[in-house]
């Protein structure tokens, strides 16, 4: 994780990854997590998916490197969070939503507590391959109690786009999550037409 890179993206407003509304796949398939109480959203930014999940009755735990993104989330939702230091993180909590500001790779099971499910729309694809090699094992370690995950990835031809987001094809998903039961739910064109219209989004339901 490069804090300088991501802080600059937020400071300069280069946050094309921020959708501003709940993700269409989450709205369509989120009921698959209906019986899961605590949901982890890694590398969450200020996504509206946090509020959407909370509105569906979940307790939501986010992790975000850029603290300004965390502040923006609560400011835009017109709520004043409780703020406290927890080890290397600053925890922001309001109602059922807690976001840990800090380095994802510094998180532990003790940081996030017991997790029932994972929702990853923009974490895996935010990372280049060497960091993806670290990300998946670390995610599974800190969320060892999770039995379900909704995963969203993008895929595009080599040379058609310079990530992030980085292309993650079906074979990579199945390799990285080989111990999971994997159901591909839907593939659709990426709505902003990036990669010359060749970028596709794919949603998976993973069961551990």
Image: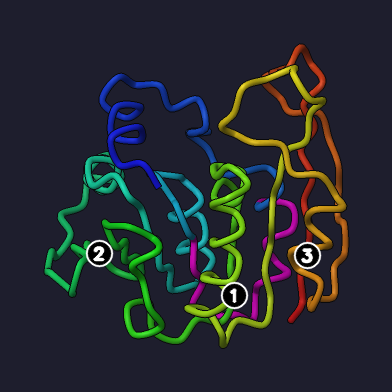
Is residue 196 rendered to the left or right of residue 120? Answer: right
Judging by the rendered image, the residue that carries numbered circle 1 is 117
Alpha carbons under labels 2 and 1: distance apart: 20 Å
Task: In the displayed orientation, state which residue is furthest to the front.
Answer: 130
Rate crowding at label 1 as few (under 14), some (14 to 19) or many (20 or more) other CA atoms within 10 Å.
many
Labels 3 and 2: the sequence-earlier one: 2
Label 3 sits on a secondary structure element that is strand
The numbered dot on residue 18 is none
169 is higher (above) or lower (below) than 9: below
Labels 2 and 1: the sequence-earlier one: 2
Judging by the rendered image, the residue that carries numbered circle 3 is 205
Label 1 sits on a secondary structure element that is strand
Label 2 sits on a secondary structure element that is strand
Judging by the rendered image, the residue that carries numbered circle 2 is 94
Q: Position of residue 6 (x, y in %)?
A: 35, 35
Rate crowding at label 3 as few (under 14), some (14 to 19) or many (20 or more) other CA atoms within 10 Å.
many
Is residue 23 rendered to the left or right of residue 138? Answer: right
Magenta segment includes 39: yes
Specify start and end residues of the magenta stretch as a single range. 27-41
């Amino acid at each position: 994780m490069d804090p300088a890179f991501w802080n600059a993206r937020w400071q300069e407003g280069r946050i094309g990854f921020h959708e501003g509304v709940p993700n269409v796949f989450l709205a369509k398939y989120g009921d698959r997590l209906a019986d899961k109480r605590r949901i982890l959203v890694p590398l969450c930014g200020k996504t509206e998916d946090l509020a959407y999940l909370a509105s569906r009755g979940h307790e939501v735990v986010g992790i975000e490197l850029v603290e300004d993104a965390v502040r923006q989330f609560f400011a835009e939702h017109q709520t004043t969070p409780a703020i406290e230091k927890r080890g290397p993180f600053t925890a922001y909590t309001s109602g059922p939503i807690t976001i840990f500001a800090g380095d994802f790779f510094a998180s532990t099971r003790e940081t996030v507590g017991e997790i029932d499910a994972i929702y990853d729309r923009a974490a895996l694809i935010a990372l280049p391959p060497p960091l993806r090699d670290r990300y998946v094992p670390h995610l599974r370690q800190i969320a060892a109690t999770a039995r379900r995950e909704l995963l969203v990835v993008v895929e595009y031809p080599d040379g058609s786009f310079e990530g992030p987001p980085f292309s993650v094809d079906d074979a990579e998903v199945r390799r990285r999550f080989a111990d999971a039961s994997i159901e591909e739910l839907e593939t659709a064109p990426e709505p902003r037409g990036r990669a010359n219209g060749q970028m596709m989004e794919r949603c998976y339901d993973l069961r551990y």
